[in-house]
Amino acid sequence: MLATQHLIAFLSLFTALFSPAIARPAALEKRALPSSLDSFYQPPSGFENEAPGAILRQRSVVVSFFGLVPDPVEAWQLLYRTTAVNGSAIAEITTVFKPSSSNLKTDRFVDFNTAYDGAARSGVCSPSYNYQLGAVQIDIISSVEYFLLQAFLLQGYIVSSPDYEGPDSAFAAGRLAGMGVLDSIRAVTNFKSTLGLSTSTPAVVGYGYSGGGLATGWAASLQQTYAPELNIKGWASGGTPANLTGTAQYLDGTLFAGFLPQALVGLSSPSAYGNVLVPFFAEHATDYGKAVLETASQICGTENLFTFEFGDIESTKVQDTGDQLFYQTILAPILDQETMGQTKNITPIAPVYLYHAQNDEIITYANASTLDTTWCNYGASVEFVTFAAGGHATTEILGFPGAYQFVNDAFAGNVGGPCTRKTVLNDTLDPLALGVQLEPVVVQLLNGLALAGREDANILSNLANWNKTIS
């Protein structure tokens, strides 16, 4: 009930702020459909012969806030060809937003990688579904992050937000996500005539936090070998899960352990490592463990938090290898391959803004700090910002103004150079942090801080209380 009241208040405030610009369609022709029910997501015969980034299908869509309030922008969805972990062809979707502002920028666009964190094979977690008017809001993370996306639209940026987990919802498969992001950039570039882009080599800056940081970090890592022709000016990545092994061990047995089953399901998807992990879990998972994984394959990230909270994935109750799970000869090489910063040839060649909470309760700070050191040693240009007074959720909000400024500076060519580090002690957000024009967005961010509480205290308390209620 409390969550519903917050949502109603959130929408009411937003509508009051933006309603003069909102044009509601006369009628909603049909309810949005997830990928499992929507033929648009199915690639045409022979698509594997197309080049990565080739547009396979396109359509215009009505996008909205929480599936209810239409967003006054032009929007399209592109089905494009990209690459699975084993090198085979797969198809993904990106949603492209074009603002109708007088300051529209036609020589650049923003790659916005939202943290949809879900392994549901039905596609209900995907941004391309959740962004549409009439979509049932299953993935609340993408729905809330949509307000961050507005900051770029209000500044006149075209924005592309891809379903980087691919057709199988391969959550945690970073290499697949990185290629999906880079190919989405290629697809948007190929869509230049419809968008009215003034150049065939538009400048691009990528942004993502948490799960979106995984996609952003891997796109940054793979650009030099997979898509060196792209005109990437920079990458802003926060709360980045750079090391899956470290993240898994950090989360196991905690309030946020629900991220682990869906990560294992995502890595076990056909387009990721399903050929080896499906037999592995069939052999080693207990009946209870198989039920946990089956549940994770049907729901989105936030719901997983309520189905496996304080769960122990390394327990023999779940699988028979116990605390040696992450060191098995099948799983360990995969986790190692999915660790950022391993070699110089998977090091970003465009400047990076990397930010992380020192007290992050979901993605360990030590792995992010290690990534910064590794990338810098390999010659990358990294601005590493530590937030000393926030948790995972609050740092997405507190860190956004800095990331937003980096995006603007990167487009202006004012980033790069030697690696730097700094620590931010402040745990408040200036109401004018993004400037007067973006004050409505900051209002929503301030609401988010209030709901999260200092260092995510309200989130932790509410989840713990929920756990007591249902146990």
Image: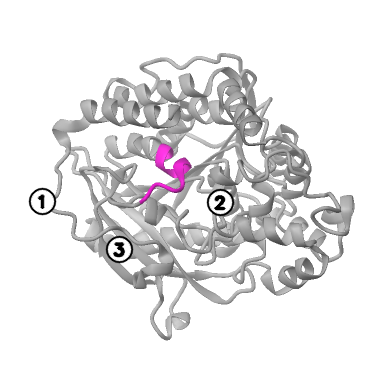
Question: What residue type is disc 2 on?
Answer: Ala
Which residue is farthest left?
A: 26
Q: Nearer the viewer, mark 3 or mark 2?
A: 2
372 vs 78, left or right, is right
Please report whichever mark, 1 or 3, sits nearer to the chain's N-terminal start: 1
Q: Which residue position holds label 3?
A: 191
Amino acid type at circle 1 is Ala
**Which mark, by number, is residue 74?**
none
Q: Is residue 19 left or right of residue 138?
A: left
Which of the two discs, 1 and 2, sits closer to the camera? 1
- Residue 390: tell me if it is visible: no
Decide whether residue 172 is among the magenta residues. no
Residue tagged 2? 215
Residue identified by numbered label 1: 26
> Marks 1 and 3, how far apart in space?
28 Å
Residue 149 or residue 373, whichever sits in front: 149
The stretch of residues the image draws in magenta is: 136-145
Which marked residue is nearer to the observer: mark 1 or mark 3?
1
How many residues crowd mark 1 within 10 Å: few (<14), some (14–19), many (20+)? few
Q: Quadrant of residue 357?
A: top right
For the residue pair 298 and 53, the one nearer the viewer reads as: 298
Residue under the image location 48 percent in, 23 percent down: 451
Residue type, label 3:
Phe
Magenta-colored segment: predominant secondary structure: helix
